[in-house]
Image (spheres, rainbow, N blue to C red):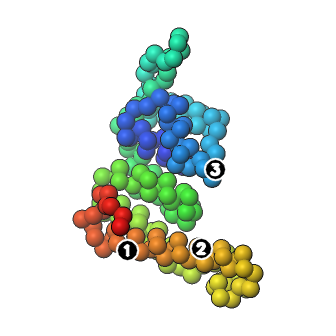
Amino acid sequence: MIVLMILGFLAEGPMHGYELRRRMGQLHGHARTISDGTIYPAITRLLGAGALTETREPGAGATTRRVLHLTDTGRDRLHVLLRDAGGHDITDGSRFFIVLAFLSLLPSAQERDAVLRRRLAFLEQPASFFYDGDHPLRASEVTDPYRRGILISARATRTAEMNWLHDQLDHPAHAGTTRTES
């Protein structure tokens, strides 16, 4: 997810490391902080792989800022990460939201829809946070009010997301566009 965020934000335009880290923190960091020890080694690896280039610009005082730029190789890698999103990138809500944040950067509507269909297929499977053997428990079957609250909240979120996914897949002309919420 770190690499996806780096490539995705730089696909929107060059930026210096601090700005990139700030945007990554805004997207992902409220629940999971992202350390410099994670971001900067990933940037170094992407520079070494030719996915990014850097220029130096004057910063505050005598310092210089590294400005990062996405290369064609980096854009190709971004497209592969988005197109091939699977496993935990589909089943983990936080990871999927990061994929979703950059999915419009994938040029092919068919490939974007395939990612959305994988998420929808996952959401359509019966699941719960609590089980009686192999039987997933519904909120009505749970007596603990806090556990029931988890299930009620998760069901509402799942239902809203499934409705949105159906809307996107049923109206391909709207896919990749921004619509005003009512």
- Which residue bears the numbered disc 3? 32
Of mark 2 and mark 3, the one earlier in the sequence is 3
In x, y percent, where is residue 16? Answer: 47, 29
- Which residue bears the numbered disc 1? 166
Mark 2 residue crowding within 10 angstroms, few (<14) / some (14–19) / many (20+): few
Of the two numbered discs 2 and 1 in the rendering, the one whose residue sits closer to the viewer? 2
Mark 1 residue crowding within 10 angstroms, few (<14) / some (14–19) / many (20+): some
Specify whether residue 133 is in view.
Answer: no
Vertical position of residue 164 compared to residue 66: above or below: below
Q: Secondary structure at mark 1?
A: helix
Measure the C-alpha gap from mark 2 to mark 1. 20 Å
**The C terminus lies in quadrant:** bottom left
Say whether marks 3 and 1 touch (CB < 8 Å). no
Q: Amino acid at mark 3?
A: Arg
Specify whether residue 27 is in view.
Answer: yes
Vertical position of residue 89 compared to residue 32: above or below: below
Q: Secondary structure at mark 3?
A: loop
Which labelled disc corresponds to residue 135? none
Q: Amino acid at mark 1?
A: His
Vertical position of residue 139 compared to residue 72: above or below: below
Q: Secondary structure at mark 2?
A: helix
Residue furthest toward the bottom? 141
Q: Amino acid at mark 2?
A: Ser
- Classify residue 85 as left or right of residue 75: right
107, 28: nearer the viewer: 28
